[in-house]
Image (cartoon, rainbow, N blue to C red):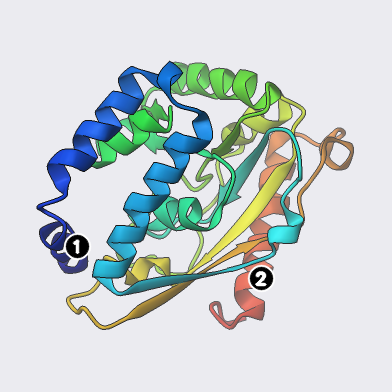
């Protein structure tokens, strides 16, 4: 958390304007294009990266579907994960966050500006309602990031937890591409007491299209996506066989 606090402190003189602008964008979305709002959030992420001495390398952009909506399913390591994807994903993408974690200052404004969804993972009925809403929006062409592990802890690092099958309904109901995403060393950003430069990676893997998963249930899809992410982490030397 030291790096996060330092980044905030270094930008404290900018915070009032940044927060005010995000509130305005969230309250008056009709006054801005989705790309304008998204670019502003990416500008904020860029400030965080610069002052926090962080860099993110991206691989596999050619795997992203060129048109239409889709859902990105990354492994989950920490608080920087969503920001790292926003940083290297050029087209607007929205977020799904744990409701309890989404109301912290600055995080709340980003979620609202990006028209993100707050999910109560302890309330299956509410979670299903959110998934259905996301499916409707993805079918209309929006893109979302959903973390299928549902959470993380500070000792998890590059390892994986089981993927929750239900979250894949956001893509299958929309008959949209499923894009596995591999995050590498993202946990290092806010899980250290140093300001030494840190470098993370985002790998977009080959998508599963509706034709690939039409005859599969969400448990099988979850297994395939997890296996592909795990295989990439193993290939990169992040997981020992």
Say which residue label 2 marks: 232
User: Does the image show residue 121?
Assistant: no
Q: Secondary structure at mark 2?
A: helix
Closest to the observer, 222 or 21: 21
Q: Secondary structure at mark 1?
A: helix
* Residue in the picture at 57% in, 34% down: 167
Position of 82 compared to 208: left or right?
left
Position of 16 compared to 93: left or right?
left
- What is the quadrant of residue 200 in the picture? bottom left
* Residue in the picture at 29% in, 74% down: 53
Quadrant that contains the N terminus: bottom left
Q: Earlier in the sequence, mark 2 or mark 1?
A: 1
- What is the quadrant of residue 59 in the picture? bottom right
- Label 2–label 1 contact, CB within 8 A: no
Point out residue 118 in the picture as x, y percentages from the top left corner.
38, 28
Tell me the distance, in whole angstroms, between the alpha carbons under discs 2 and 1: 31 Å
Point out residue 26 in the picture as x, y percentages from the top left corner.
34, 24
Nearer the observer: mark 2 or 1; the answer is 1
Closest to the observer, 41 or 225: 41
Say which residue label 1 marks: 7
* Residue in the picture at 74% in, 43% down: 220
């Amino acid at each position: 958390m030291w790096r996060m606090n330092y980044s905030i402190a270094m930008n404290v003189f900018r915070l009032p304007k940044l927060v005010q602008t995000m509130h305005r964008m969230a309250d008056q979305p009709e006054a801005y294009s989705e790309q304008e709002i998204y670019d502003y959030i990416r500008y904020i992420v860029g400030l965080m990266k610069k002052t926090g001495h962080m860099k993110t390398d991206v691989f596999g952009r050619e795997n992203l579907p060129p048109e239409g909506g889709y859902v990105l399913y990354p492994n989950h390591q920490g608080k920087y994960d969503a920001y790292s994807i926003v940083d290297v994903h050029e087209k607007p993408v929205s977020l799904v966050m744990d409701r309890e974690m989404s109301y912290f200052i600055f995080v709340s404004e980003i979620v609202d500006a990006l028209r993100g969804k707050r999910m109560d993972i302890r309330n299956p009925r509410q979670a299903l309602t959110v998934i259905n809403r996301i499916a409707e929006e993805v079918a209309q062409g929006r893109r979302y990031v959903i973390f299928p592990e549902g959470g993380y802890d500070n000792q998890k690092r590059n390892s994986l937890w089981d993927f929750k099958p239900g979250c894949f309904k956001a893509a299958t109901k929309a008959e949209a591409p499923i894009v596995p995403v591999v995050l590498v060393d993202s946990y290092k950003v806010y899980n250290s007491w140093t300001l030494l430069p840190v470098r993370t990676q985002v790998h977009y893997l080959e998508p599963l299209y509706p034709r690939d998963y039409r005859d599969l249930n969400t448990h099988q899809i979850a297994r395939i996506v997890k296996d592909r992410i795990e295989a990439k982490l193993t290939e990169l030397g992040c997981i020992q066989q």
